[in-house]
Amino acid sequence: PTLKLPTMLNAHATTTLLEDLEIPYMPRDKNPPNCPQLIPIKKFWAILKKKVYKDGWEASSFRMLKQHITSILSQLDNDFCQRLFSGLKSKLRIAAVNGILSVI
Protein backbone atom coordinates (compact mmCIF):
# COMPACT_ATOMS: atom_id res chain seq x y z
CA PRO A 1 0.00 0.00 0.00
CA THR A 2 1.14 3.53 -0.78
CA LEU A 3 1.32 6.04 2.05
CA LYS A 4 -0.11 9.38 0.98
CA LEU A 5 0.82 12.31 3.18
CA PRO A 6 -1.36 15.40 3.44
CA THR A 7 0.23 18.17 1.38
CA MET A 8 0.01 20.90 3.98
CA LEU A 9 1.78 19.26 6.93
CA ASN A 10 4.01 21.44 9.03
CA ALA A 11 7.40 20.22 10.22
CA HIS A 12 6.19 19.16 13.66
CA ALA A 13 3.25 17.19 12.26
CA THR A 14 5.51 15.51 9.71
CA THR A 15 8.03 14.54 12.40
CA THR A 16 5.27 13.18 14.60
CA LEU A 17 3.83 11.17 11.72
CA LEU A 18 7.21 9.68 10.85
CA GLU A 19 7.81 8.73 14.48
CA ASP A 20 4.32 7.22 14.85
CA LEU A 21 4.85 5.12 11.73
CA GLU A 22 8.36 4.19 12.91
CA ILE A 23 9.90 5.55 9.72
CA PRO A 24 13.55 6.49 10.23
CA TYR A 25 14.48 10.04 9.30
CA MET A 26 17.36 12.44 9.75
CA PRO A 27 16.50 15.28 12.14
CA ARG A 28 16.95 18.79 10.76
CA ASP A 29 19.75 19.66 13.20
CA LYS A 30 21.78 16.73 11.84
CA ASN A 31 20.96 17.48 8.20
CA PRO A 32 20.58 21.23 7.67
CA PRO A 33 19.21 22.33 4.30
CA ASN A 34 21.83 25.02 3.70
CA CYS A 35 25.38 24.15 4.59
CA PRO A 36 27.68 25.17 1.73
CA GLN A 37 30.65 23.60 3.53
CA LEU A 38 29.03 20.21 2.98
CA ILE A 39 27.71 20.89 -0.53
CA PRO A 40 30.71 21.98 -2.64
CA ILE A 41 28.82 21.47 -5.89
CA LYS A 42 26.79 24.58 -5.06
CA LYS A 43 30.00 26.59 -4.83
CA PHE A 44 31.15 25.11 -8.14
CA TRP A 45 27.89 26.12 -9.88
CA ALA A 46 28.07 29.61 -8.36
CA ILE A 47 31.61 30.08 -9.67
CA LEU A 48 30.66 28.72 -13.09
CA LYS A 49 27.62 31.01 -13.27
CA LYS A 50 29.74 34.02 -12.33
CA LYS A 51 32.23 33.19 -15.09
CA VAL A 52 29.52 32.51 -17.68
CA TYR A 53 27.71 35.81 -17.13
CA LYS A 54 30.82 37.91 -16.50
CA ASP A 55 30.56 41.46 -17.84
CA GLY A 56 26.84 41.01 -18.58
CA TRP A 57 27.33 38.29 -21.19
CA GLU A 58 24.05 36.94 -22.61
CA ALA A 59 23.33 34.02 -24.90
CA SER A 60 21.06 34.42 -27.88
CA SER A 61 20.51 30.68 -28.19
CA PHE A 62 20.88 27.46 -26.24
CA ARG A 63 23.69 26.42 -28.60
CA MET A 64 25.60 29.61 -27.88
CA LEU A 65 25.17 29.12 -24.12
CA LYS A 66 26.37 25.53 -24.37
CA GLN A 67 29.47 26.54 -26.35
CA HIS A 68 30.27 29.32 -23.89
CA ILE A 69 29.94 27.01 -20.86
CA THR A 70 32.06 24.35 -22.57
CA SER A 71 34.74 26.93 -23.26
CA ILE A 72 34.77 28.12 -19.65
CA LEU A 73 34.87 24.56 -18.31
CA SER A 74 37.90 23.81 -20.49
CA GLN A 75 39.69 26.80 -18.92
CA LEU A 76 39.00 25.78 -15.32
CA ASP A 77 41.95 24.55 -13.34
CA ASN A 78 41.57 20.83 -12.55
CA ASP A 79 43.40 21.31 -9.26
CA PHE A 80 40.85 23.92 -8.24
CA CYS A 81 37.99 21.47 -8.84
CA GLN A 82 39.76 18.73 -6.93
CA ARG A 83 40.52 21.07 -4.01
CA LEU A 84 36.91 22.15 -3.92
CA PHE A 85 35.78 18.58 -3.28
CA SER A 86 38.76 17.36 -1.26
CA GLY A 87 38.07 16.41 2.32
CA LEU A 88 34.33 16.15 1.78
CA LYS A 89 34.07 12.63 3.23
CA SER A 90 35.91 13.63 6.39
CA LYS A 91 33.80 16.79 6.76
CA LEU A 92 30.65 14.71 6.49
CA ARG A 93 31.95 12.29 9.14
CA ILE A 94 32.92 15.13 11.47
CA ALA A 95 29.52 16.79 11.02
CA ALA A 96 27.72 13.51 11.69
CA VAL A 97 29.65 12.90 14.91
CA ASN A 98 30.15 16.42 16.26
CA GLY A 99 27.26 18.33 14.72
CA ILE A 100 27.05 20.73 11.82
CA LEU A 101 28.67 23.63 13.63
CA SER A 102 31.94 21.70 13.81
CA VAL A 103 32.54 22.13 10.06
CA ILE A 104 31.43 25.73 9.66
Image (cartoon, helix red, strand yellow):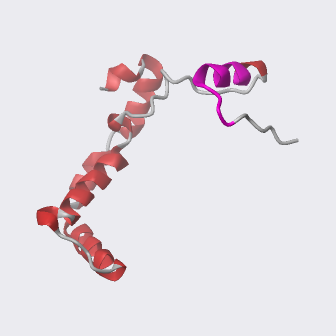
Magenta region, main secondary structure: helix
Q: Is residue 14 magenta?
A: yes
Q: Nearer the viewer, residue 103 or 6?
A: 6
What residue is rendered at 71% in x and 24% in y?
18
10 left or right, relative to 77 = right
Residue 88, image quadrant: top left
Q: How many tags in the picture? A: 0
Spot the residue most to the left.
55
Residues shaded magenta: 7-18
Is residue 31 among the parts visible in the rendering? Answer: yes
Q: Nearer the viewer, residue 99 or 66?
A: 66
Spot the residue most to the front.
8
What residue is rendered at 78% in x and 38% in y?
4
Q: Quadrant of the C terminus?
A: top left
Residue 6, image quadrant: top right
Q: Is residue 48 magenta?
A: no
